[in-house]
Image (cartoon, rainbow, N blue to C red):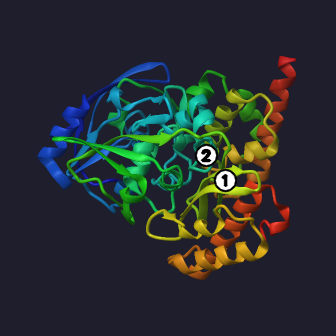
Amino acid sequence: MTAPVSISLDVNGERVDALVLPRLNLADFLREQLQLTGTHVGCEHGVCGACTVRVNGEIVRSCLMLAVQAHGAAVQTIEGLSDSGEVADLQAAFRDRNALQCGFCTPGMLMAAQDLLKQEARPDRDRIREHLSGNYCRCTGYQAIIDAVETTARARGGRRV
Amino acid sequence: MKAAAFAYARATSVVNALDLLQAHGDRAKVLSGGQSLMPAMNLRLISPELVVDIGEVAELRGISVTGDTVRIGALTRHVELQRSPEIAAHAPLLTEAIAHVAHPAIRNRGTIGGSLAHADPASELPACMVALNATIIIRGKTGERRVVATDFFTGIYETALSAQELLVAVELPAARRKSAHFFCEFARRHGDYAIAGLAAQAVVEGDLFADLRLAFFAVGNRPVLAKAATKLVNIAITPAVLSAALAALSQELDPQSDLQASASMRRHLAGVLLTRCVGTLLGRSDLGAGGSA
């Protein structure tokens, strides 16, 4: 009854074919089968946001999605966003504004922050705080994280003008 | 934690999903967005033998407006409701409420049908359905049946849906001229489940409520359509009238105590919400909006 299921998906621009058990969540699939360990597994019930990845361009909780549900989808992890340089400035701002701390929440924070900055050029601090409210930082480094996102938004906005 | 092992079936149509549910009954669970089901499975609160994934059933998607009726397919995601111009025009209560449903990453996956079928008494959408006097459309092997929202929710995580049936859509009456809405919840963190919340839909004629539906959530085992609203309809609202409504509300609510709040705190917060709702909808700051209950 619980036989492995064959899936095909695109992960960070590369085609992946795999056999997965239905119970395997997308986060564990990325980490254990593809060794993409930037996606972190925290609470495993959708509260902490450490497992945030993009599926078909939109951020999702990869602990609340089965790998079998990603069949046919395009998945982007923090490795993909980092390697392509899409979040290079955001990463630099996190470093400069001391927003990294232990780093466990950082991949999810970057995924969520980049999602906001793609939708809105100049979010204010309240908006940033609201958009990141689904991501926990165990070091409680929230102020510095908001600073880093705000700094990046300003810099990107400046480039556009 | 991880979910226990289960078998998986990707439904190709509503009929196919119903066949699977017919064959497996309550040993099966329907997976739509997974934002309530997966946490429950990961916490081992439930361990279905079969998961029927309806995520690809296109006929369950979409928002349409026909005459005075707004129909929302069960698979419509929260983010689609939030961005829908039809919903903003004809059911603005939902547009406002969705901003309080979890967080962006969860709103991208969660569906209206999933939220309603899960029936968490502290969640926003069931209360909105009660406030909006929605009809829940259910399909089974023998056909379709329609249940009004106030009858659909029967207890904590309990609904009128049987294990062999599928929630396929909801229908709402489109907001009329002079309609007004109010939504507010108290939560520990923006997007978390409410400690107490209120979704309200009203018709305001001049200084009076011609109609008022108050659906409180997180203060009972299901969304509560407050009878206290009758004390506020077609009457000039004075502090005394409001006090009588607050007293009636306090009598009819039977909130639970839990780690987040005591029953008396929830009763108090419900009164604060009622006061804010009346003051906001009538534009009456003199009624002590945000004041004590």
Identify the mark nearer the N-term, 2 or 1: 2
Residue B31 position, x and y percent, is 33, 43
In the rendered view, would you say B61 is above or below A23? above
User: What chain does badge 2 belong to?
Assistant: B
* Label 1 residue SS: strand
In this view of the protein, can residue B60 be seen by the observer?
A: yes
Left or right side of B260 for B14: left
Residue A70 position, x and y percent, is 38, 31
Left or right side of B286 for B235: left
Amino acid carrying label 1: it is Phe
Instruction: Please name whichever residue, B188 or B186, is drawn nearer the observer in this view of the structure.
Output: B186
Q: In the drawing, what numbered circle is on residue B159?
A: none
Q: Which residue is mark 1?
A: B182
In this view of the protein, can residue B76 be seen by the observer?
A: no
* Label 2 residue SS: helix
Which quadrant of the view contains residue A141?
bottom right
Q: Residue at x 81, y 40 (%)?
A: A124
Residue B165 position, x and y percent, is 24, 46
Q: Residue at x 72, y 67 (%)?
A: B275
Q: Are marks 2 and 1 in contact (CB under 8 Å)?
A: yes
Residue A154 position, x and y percent, is 85, 31
- Assign the N terminus of chain B to one quadrant of the image: bottom left
In the rendered view, would you say A52 is above or below B293? above
Q: In the drawing, what numbered circle is on residue B93?
A: 2
